[in-house]
Structure formats: structure tokens, C-alpha cells
Image (cartoon, rainbow, N blue to C red):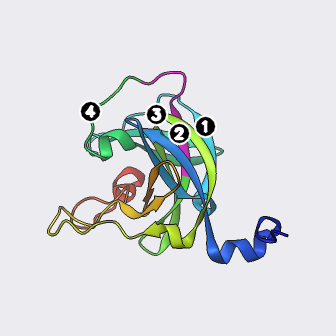
Amino acid sequence: MNEGSATPASKQSSTHEQLLTFVVNGEEYGVDILRVQEIRGWSTPMPIPNTPVYVKGVINIRGDIVPIADLRERLGLEHRDYGATTAVVVLRVLNGSRHRIMGIVVDAMSDVTNVPSTDIKPPPDFGGGNGPSLAKGIATLSDKMVTILDVDQIFSLPGGDPVAQEAAA
């Protein structure tokens, strides 16, 4: 009898990570599902002056002003027009000592995936770099690799200054 498939979620959480996965530039990325507040379709945000090019502006979500970053541009990729599959993943991000709500624009949604903790490896160290890595880990699944993003770093500028402070000011 295979008891592994009947493992309760409470036991599974210690040996598995549940990721929300999405596609950017044909590659799959994931974030900890517990950091996801909601998924929305694309709507044009209100621009904010003097923010990095990847920050598209802010939207109002139930009274909260939420900065929106284009993950494609944040990763240094070419801008792509938004279409029917474009989505905004709204995340809870640790900004300094506070949690804030921020959104990232992705090309398309993929799935919710349970990944065994043993299948998650640290990202390679390329030395030097321009600040902290956006990758928290690499999950190796049977037919693909998924880059697990550190959601707290997506809105950080080199030098550690969070974009959220600029957008919220």
C-alpha cells in the first residue's frame, strides 16, 4: 500500500513546498503559495514618476494602493505587449519590518505545484552581481526546472532600497 499519496497536508507541508507557478518569457517561475494574496487579470496601473522602468505604477485593490512591477522587465528581459493571458500576481512582501501588498505582471499562469523539499536546490552563485539574487531556489521536477523567486527581493533596488517605499511615498 502506498501511504505517501494519502499523507495529510499538515505532514506534507514539512517535506514539501507548495508553489504558485507562472510563465515569463517561456520559462517557469514559482512563488511560495502562502505569499500570494490573489491573481488578477491585467489592468493598466496609474504611473508613478521617478520609479524604475519595471514599475508600471499602482492600482487600487479594496482601498490599498498596490505597486505593480513587470517581472519580465525586472528580470532584464525585453518588454512584451500585454495580452489575454497576462496576469498580475498580488503578493505579500516583507519590506523592511512591515508586510506590504505588491503585484507582479507575468506572461501567463501555470499551476499550483507541490515540490518535495529535497528537489529544491539553492541558486548558483555567480559571484559579485548587482545586489541580492531574485532567485531563492531552483526546483527540479521530472520534466522541467522552476526558478523559485524571493518575493521580498523583487521590489528591492541595488543597494537595498525598496521600491515600495518610493511608490508609497
Whole-angstrom CA distance, mark 2 to mark 3, is 9 Å
Look at the image and say whether residue 128 sits in the magenta stretch.
no
Label of residue 88 in the image: 2
Q: Which of marks 2 and 4 is in front?
A: 4
Whole-angstrom CA distance, mark 3 to mark 4, is 12 Å
Q: Give the range drawn in magenta.
A: 82-90
Q: Mark 4 points at which residue?
A: 78
Left or right of 63 on screen, residue 158: left
- Residue 106 in the image: x percent, y percent? 46, 38
Q: Which residue is drawn at 28% across and 64% down?
A: 161
**In terms of secondary structure, where does tag 1 sit?**
strand
Left or right of 139 on screen, residue 35: right
Tell me which label, 2 or 1, sits earlier in the chain: 1
Whole-angstrom CA distance, mark 2 to mark 1, is 5 Å
Q: Name the residue under label 1.
A: 40
Whole-angstrom CA distance, mark 2 to mark 4, is 18 Å
Query: 77 or 4: which is nearer to us?
Result: 4
- Residue 133 in the image: x percent, y percent? 30, 63
Q: Mark 3 points at which residue?
A: 107
**In terms of secondary structure, where does tag 4 sit?**
loop
- Classed neighbour count for the residue bearing mark 4: other residues with Cα under 10 Å, few (<14), some (14–19), many (≥20): few
Tell me which label, 4 or 1, sits earlier in the chain: 1
* Residue 18 picture quarter: bottom right
Whole-angstrom CA distance, mark 4 to mark 1, is 22 Å
Query: 109 or 145: which is nearer to us?
Result: 145
Tell me which label, 2 or 3, sits earlier in the chain: 2
Left or right of 143 on screen, residue 124: left
Tell me which label, 2 or 4, sits earlier in the chain: 4
- Residue 81 in the image: x percent, y percent? 38, 22
Q: Which amino acid does label 2 sit on?
A: Val
